[in-house]
Image (cartoon, grey):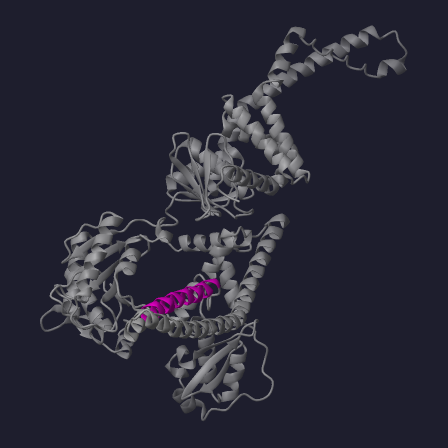
Amino acid sequence: MLAKVITRKAVSRGFGEAVRYIARDNADQLDEPRPEMGTLQLDCPLDTPEDRQTAIDILDATAAAARNKTARGPVYHVTLAWQEAEHPERPQIDAACAHVMQTLGFAGHEALWALHRDTDHDHVHLIVNRVHADGHTAKVPRYDWLLLDKAMREIELAQGWRHSPGPYVVVQDQDQDKPVIAKMSRAERAKRGRLEDGPRLSNAAKAAEHRNAGAPSFQGWLSGEPAQALRVAVQQPGATWQSLHRAAAGYGVSITPKGSGLVATTTLDDGRVLAAKASQMGRWASKSALENALGPYVPPRGPMPEPTVAYAAALDGQRASLRGEPQHVGIDPERQRRRAERAQARTLLAKRFKAEQQASRMRRPALRKALTERHRAERQMLTAELRQMRATAIAEHKRDGLLPQVAISYQAWMAAGRREALQKQQAAERRALTAKIPRSEVWRTWLDKQAEQGDEAAKAALRGIRYREQRKSKKYQQQDGIEGEDLDPLRKLTVAALDAQIDPKRQLVIYRGQDGQEKFTDTGPRIVMHDKAADSLEAALRIASQKYGGQVDITGSSEFRERAARQAVRLGIKVANADLQAIVVDEQARMQQQRAPTRATKESRDTDQTHERKHAESRSSEKTSGISPELGDKPAPAPRQAAPALDRAAMPKIQALRDTPREQAIQTMEQAIGRWLDGDRSSGPVKAFIAAHDRATRQGGNGRALLADVVDRVFTRRGDGVAADLSGFMSTIERQRKREQGMGR
């Protein structure tokens, strides 16, 4: 188990923010799963948002009664995380939280917890009120993180969990033959092999990896291959500072002194310089260790070799790998072109983000200065106005026979109200400016804003981030689903028996059956199955074939993968999984065997027809025996069969079918789409399409079936190349309907 104290830059004086966050009651958390919650020394249910608000009010009321206030506020927030595949039950969570509170000196205080199970590691958020019900405030221990690590080992021993690495370790007492908890230094833990894997990264480096969706930070990259190569260079006989500098230059790294130590730096393509302590590569790379081995520091001299491996190139490669873009053998040129277009769109999107951030940083000081000067002028004007009002009011009150003290008091009240109103107005303007032009914006927050404005590149980047987050889950490969390369922007794909609903916030398409149940969900590069029925599987595979260029990967249980692979073969869809090729070959052989009787029947029929033709030719030769040899050698032309006479009585019926309201509506809707695809982007085709669709549905037609037939006809006549324009037409239809209903502009 691991424990972490959650601190905030701005100390919250209340419990509302923290409780709503762990309970996932905020507006941006409504799609996340509801956590299991519990309380300690707090007699209050937590089942509904109203119950949780009552708990917040109780905690705030207790904190307000504190006899002594502290700078850190009354909220103490800590998380307890179990290892992978460990799933605590409610009694174990209650016992663990109570033990933590006892260790920190918070026994008897009000607290509540929430269990989150939506990550690889189950973890509990524990929020404690530092103010006791009797009014005294408990101090936070100075080394609370160290006490928490020891408490984790104690909980692990008591509840039978695996031991996590930390300052406190569990060792076997040889005298008493039982495990005991002992504190060990990092050097001693390294000697005993009890250190966690990987380099020790700073909080800034960890935050950078989080922003880059898991791509390595410069510290983490430096601790890998470059550190190994530089250490070999230092250990070579006759090594000097110049040989170390040349080895570092091969990785685009410079080693320079800073303060009392050394730093390793690299420069990115955009001019940014990234730095890490040289000792990040290991103790051998500290300044004292290097000077003991190489002598006093000497700066690099002369030309240095060009880098063969640089952090920027390794970062781009890792990001491409995280985006799921391996260069497959045999990929078709069209797919390569689309992939290159998406890569270029992402590059342009990143450049636009950097440019906007730079422009924002440059524009912010000027706007802030102008706002400050305007606020100062407003305060000066108000001061002058209040001074004039005070003199006038005192004179008026004196004429009315009132004492000057009364006039002064009244005017002080008036002035205080005016000043307070101005202060609130100016504070609101400052907050509005900060919200409009923040100091810095996180990449994902910026993507969310761009996606809301309809930027397709931002939507694709968000889908990629969510997809990478999903792939990190250990449960991913055990989940039944079909995936492939997302070739086109997210669009609504129609299957006649399904209802497709787009979730614009999560960028998902949810497919439901006629019974309203979810059949599967299209997340972009992956279709997640919820219903394993044959019709749902076939529909999902057909959609995957249309989206992913006829090739899919299948994940999940062995039974599902075999069913899906065989169904894909029957539908003519290529299965990319190498371990399913034996099933693919077996299904293809089975299909050939099933076709064999049909093929034999067809061959027999062809043989009979050949015999009849030869017999007819022999009779024809007998009849033409008296004709000249030149004419007799030429085969007689086959007599043209007369077309069957059209039943005149059936013609009115056919004409009636063509004149049905449904057929008329389909023709009108198809004509409207044709006008749009041919370049007419006015409101005429849109309104004609809507009018024909609504008229047919009012007469009893099925709206979804109409759309399916129209789209099928358009694709049949114009090909799949019109998919993007057709998707834009459908989006325009939705916007027009919202305008007619008064829901949008």
**Is 259 rendered above or below residue 56?**
below
Q: From the viewer's side, name the closer residue of 384 and 210.
A: 384
Q: From the viewer's side, name the closer residue of 75 and 123.
A: 75
Which range is magenta? 412-436
Q: Give the residue displayed 36% in from the left and 52% down from the top.
A: 27
Q: Residue 202 in the image: state x and y as whole percent.
A: 38, 73
Predominant secondary structure, magenta span: helix
- In the shown orientation, is residue 358 left or right of residue 185? right
Q: Give the residue displayed 63% in from the left and 41% down from the top.
A: 721
- In the shown orientation, is residue 547 left or right of residue 683? left
Count of labels in the image: 0
Q: Give the residue displayed 37% in from the left and 43% down from the top.
A: 557
The answer to which image quadrant residue 690 occupies is top right
Q: Residue 24 in the image: state x and y as whole percent.
A: 31, 53
Asked whether residue 475 appears in the rendered view, the answer is: yes
Screen quadrant of the N terminus: bottom left
Magenta stretch encompasses residue 385:
no
Q: Residue 402 in the image: state x and y as whole percent.
A: 29, 71
